[in-house]
């Protein structure tokens, strides 16, 4: 599943960064939240990635 594949999570984070840069913070937030959820599933809540 894409939501738990680390390279895909990084890509989603990068998309959030891009959307933030082009002035679309609401859409960026969606990517950041989705990424955070996937990172928590993969690494757990105690890891620095979260």
Image (cartoon, rainbow, N blue to C red):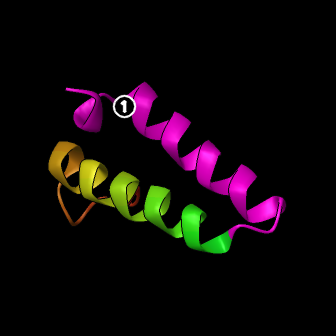
Q: What span is colored magenta in the figure?
A: 1-24
Q: Residue at x 70, y 56 (%)?
A: 19
Q: Quadrant of residue 6?
A: top left
| Relative vertical location of residue 10 with respect to residue 44 in this rendering, above or below | above
Image height of 42 relative to 19, above or below:
above
Percent across and percent down for residue 10 are 50, 38
Q: Nearer the viewer, residue 43 or 31?
A: 31
Residue 19 appears left or right of 8? right
Q: To which quarter of the image does residue 15 belong? A: top right
The answer to whether 19 appears left or right of 32 in the picture is right
Disc 1 is placed on an element classified as helix
Q: Would you name the residue on which mark 1 appears?
A: 6
Rendered position, 33 above or below 3: below
Q: Write the residue at 16% across / 49% down.
A: 41
Which residue occupies 44% across, 26% down? Answer: 7
Residue 23: x percent and y percent? Answer: 80, 68
């Amino acid at each position: 599943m894409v939501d738990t594949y680390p390279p895909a999570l990084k890509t989603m984070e990068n998309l959030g960064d891009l959307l933030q840069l082009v002035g679309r913070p609401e859409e960026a937030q969606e990517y950041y939240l989705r990424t955070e959820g996937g990172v928590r599933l993969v690494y757990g809540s105690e890891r620095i990635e979260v």
